[in-house]
Image: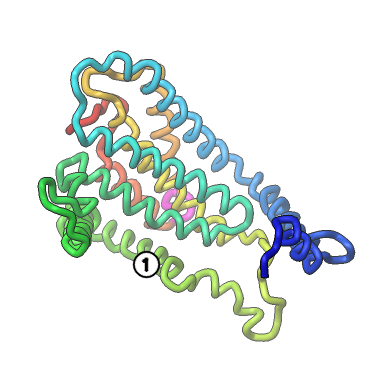
C-alpha cells in the first residue's frame, strides 16, 4: 500500500499514544535515562579524568592540524596515514560507548569496548614492529584482492599479536597473564551471548520481579564499564604521542599535560589493587606500561 510521508507518520502516531500523549511510553525511556545520568554524577573522579582525557585528545588534534602539519617538510611514512585515523576512531568509540553507559546501558557500552581494546593492542604491536598495518588488515601489498586470503592473514596476525602482547610469548608475569585471561573472559561472557546482562533478569525468570527493560542504575554494572573504559582510554592516551611527526614535536606544555594524565590513569587503574584488593589493577598497569611503552617524547616510529 502506497503511503505519503505524512500518512506514514500519521498512522504510526495513531498507534503510539499513551494516555493521550504521542509516543508517551517512549518518554518512560527518556525519563529513566535522565535519572541514570544524574546517578552517574557521584563518580566525580572518573568524570574529571574522562573529560580531561577528551579535552587533551581534542587539543592534540588541534595542535597537529595547526602547529605540526605546517612544519612537516619531508614525506611521512605511508603508515602514518593509517595510524592516525585508527587512533581517532578508537577515541570516537570511547566517546560513543561512554554516552551509551551514562544513559543507562553500561553492559551494552561494555561490549563496544571489546573491539576498541583489540584494535589498540594491534596498533601498538604494529608501532613496535611486532606486525605491520598491512597484515592487521589482511592485505599483502602487490597481490590481487582475495577475500579468503585476507581473512586468513588477518586472523593469523591477530593470534600472533595476542601471543606476543598478552599471551605465552609476551614476557608478562604468569600472574598478570592469568588475571588478564579472566578479565578477557568477562568480555566474552557479555559480547557472545549477553550473559552478564541476562543475569540481571533472574528475578523475572523466577517470577519475583517485573521484566527489566527501562534503564536502572546498578553500581556493579556501571563499575564493570567504568573500569574497562579507564583501561582502554589509558591505552589510547599511551598511543597518542606517536601522532607527533618525526622531528616536529608538540609544545612542552602539551608534554606536561600528557604526563599528568598518564599519572592519573595509572592511579585510577592501580586503585583496583591498592584500594579494593583486586589483582587485575596491577595486571593492567603491567600490561599498559610494558606493551604500550610510549611517552610524551615519542614520535611516529615507522
Q: Quadrant of the N terminus?
A: bottom right
x and y, in percent, of residue 56 in the image: 46, 29
Which residue is found at the position 24% from the left and 56% from the top?
A: 166
Q: Is residue 258 left or right of residue 2?
A: left
x and y, in percent, of residue 67 in the image: 37, 16
Question: From what the image shows, is residue 178 above or below residue 116?
Answer: below
* Secondary element at image label 1: helix
Q: Is residue 77 left or right of residue 206?
A: left
Question: From what the image shows, is residue 191 above or below residue 35?
Answer: below
Question: What residue is pinned by disc 1?
Answer: 185
Question: From what the image shows, is residue 29 above or below residue 249?
Answer: below
Instruction: Please indicate, yes or no, whether residue 266 appears anywhere in the rendered image.
Output: no
Q: Nearer the viewer, residue 187 or 153?
A: 153
Which residue is found at the position 24% from the left and 51% from the top?
A: 137
Please count the marks in the image: 1
Q: Which image quadrant for residue 264?
A: top left
Work out which residue is located at the far bottom of the displayed protein and give it: 206
Instruction: Please indicate, yes or no, whether residue 90 appears anywhere in the rendered image.
Output: yes
Q: Nearer the viewer, residue 115 or 5?
A: 5
**Magenta segment:** 272-277
Q: Is residue 58 magenta?
A: no
x and y, in percent, of residue 278 in the image: 42, 57
Amino acid at each position: 500500500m502506497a503511503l505519503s510521508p505524512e500518512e506514514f507518520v500519521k498512522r504510526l502516531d495513531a498507534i503510539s499514544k499513551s494516555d493521550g500523549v504521542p509516543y508517551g511510553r517512549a518518554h518512560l525511556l527518556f525519563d529513566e535515562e535522565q535519572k541514570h545520568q544524574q546517578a552517574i554524577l557521584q563518580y566525580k573522579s572518573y568524570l574529571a579524568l574522562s573529560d580531561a582525557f577528551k579535552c587533551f585528545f581534542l587539543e592534540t588534534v588541534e595542535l597537529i592540524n595547526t602547529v605540526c602539519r605546517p612544519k612537516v617538510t619531508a614525506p611521512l611514512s605511508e603508515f602514518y596515514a593509517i595510524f592516525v585515523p585508527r587512533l581517532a576512531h578508537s577515541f570516537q568509540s570511547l566517546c560513543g560507548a561512554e554516552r551509551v553507559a551514562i544513559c543507562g546501558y553500561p553492559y551494552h557500552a561494555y561490549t563496544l569496548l571489546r573491539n576498541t581494546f583489540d584494535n589498540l593492542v594491534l596498533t601498538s604491536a604494529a608501532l613496535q614492529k611486532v606486525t605491520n598495518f598491512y597484515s592487521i588488515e589482511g592485505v599483502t601489498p602487490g597481490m590481487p584482492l582475495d577475500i579468503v586470503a585476507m581473512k586468513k592473514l588477518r586472523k593469523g596476525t591477530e593470534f600472533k599479536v595476542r601471543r606476543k602482547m598478552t599471551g605465552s610469548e609476551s614476557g608478562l608475569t604468569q600472574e598478570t597473564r592469568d588475571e588478564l585471561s579472566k578479565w578477557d573472559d568477562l568480555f566474552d561472557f557479555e559480547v557472545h551471548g549477553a550473559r552478564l546482562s541476562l543475569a540481571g533478569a533472574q528475578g523475572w525468570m523466577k517470577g519475583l520481579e517485573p521484566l527489566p527493560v527501562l534503564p536502572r542504575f546498578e553500581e556493579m554494572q556501571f563499575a564493570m564499564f567504568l573500569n574497562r573504559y579507564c583501561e582502554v582510554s589509558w591505552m589510547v592516551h599511551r598511543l597518542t604521542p606517536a601522532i607527533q611527526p618525526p622531528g616536529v614535536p608538540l609544545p612542552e606544555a602539551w608534554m606536561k599535560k600528557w604526563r599528568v594524565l598518564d599519572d592519573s590513569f595509572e592511579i585510577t587503574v592501580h586503585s583496583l589493587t591498592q584500594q579494593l584488593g583486586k589483582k587485575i589493577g596491577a595486571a593492567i598497569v603491567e600490561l599498559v606500561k610494558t606493551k604500550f611503552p610510549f611517552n610524551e617524547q615519542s614520535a611516529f616510529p615507522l
